[in-house]
Image (tube, rainbow, N blue to C red):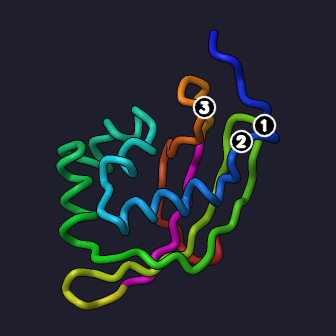
Amino acid sequence: MVAKAPTDQRPPTEEVVRNYYTNINQGDFKASWNMLSDNFRTNRKAHPKGYDSYVDWWGRQIQRVEINQIKPLQATGETATVDAQLTYSLNGGKSSPADVRFYLVWDDTSGKWVVKDAQRVRRGS
């Protein structure tokens, strides 16, 4: 049995989201992909061709992600919800604002927060 990390020793959830986009901005797609839960990685709606779809989006469509604000909404010992206000700089030169809600779950095996789901949300919801 894996020992559980006390909840007060877990990294802040906003740090997880910040690290996720840092990995993407540095082109370390394998590291950001590994921050997703197994179920999210195999979600064919989000990633129709798995890792290839993921890299195609982040590597070919997006030049950079600017984090404008990260706001934790709720956290229990095992789950958390975090909102991120972002600006995507697209490879074509345009930029696009994006509000993304992250659903995190604590993974006892790895001892880390993982992204269970992420969804675009309308500002103010």
Q: Please state which amino acid type lies under the numbered disc 3.
A: Gly
Give percent across and percent down for residue 27.
29, 62
Q: Are marks 3 and 1 in contact (CB under 8 Å)?
A: no
SS of the residue at dot 2? loop
How far is disc 1 from disc 2 in space, using C-alphas?
5 Å
Q: Which residue was labeled with disc 3?
A: 111
- Badge 3 local density, few (<14 within 10 Å), some, or many (20+)? some
Q: Is residue 102 magenta?
A: yes
Q: Are marks 1 and 2 in contact (CB under 8 Å)?
A: yes
SS of the residue at dot 1? helix
When the figure is inspected, residue 46 is found, relative to residue 87, above or below; the finding is: above
How far is disc 3 from disc 2 in space, using C-alphas?
8 Å
Q: Is residue 12 left or right of residue 62?
A: right
Q: Which residue was labeled with disc 2?
A: 10
Q: Quadrant of the C terminus?
A: bottom right
How far is disc 3 from disc 1 in space, using C-alphas?
11 Å
Q: Please state which amino acid type lies under the numbered disc 1.
A: Thr
Identify the residue shown where x is 64% and y is 59%.
14
Q: Would you identify the image quadrant in which residue 9 lies?
A: top right
Mark linked to residue 62: none
SS of the residue at dot 3? loop
- Residue at the right extreme, as displayed: 8
Q: Please state which amino acid type lies under the numbered disc 2.
A: Arg
Q: Would you identify the image quadrant in which residue 69 lies?
A: bottom right
- Residue at the bottom extreme, as displayed: 93
- Badge 1 local density, few (<14 within 10 Å), some, or many (20+)? few
Identify the residue shown where x is 63% and y is 15%.
2
Mark linked to residue 7: 1
- The span picked out in magenta is 96-104
Q: Earlier in the sequence, mark 3 or mark 2?
A: 2
Q: Earlier in the sequence, mark 3 or mark 1?
A: 1
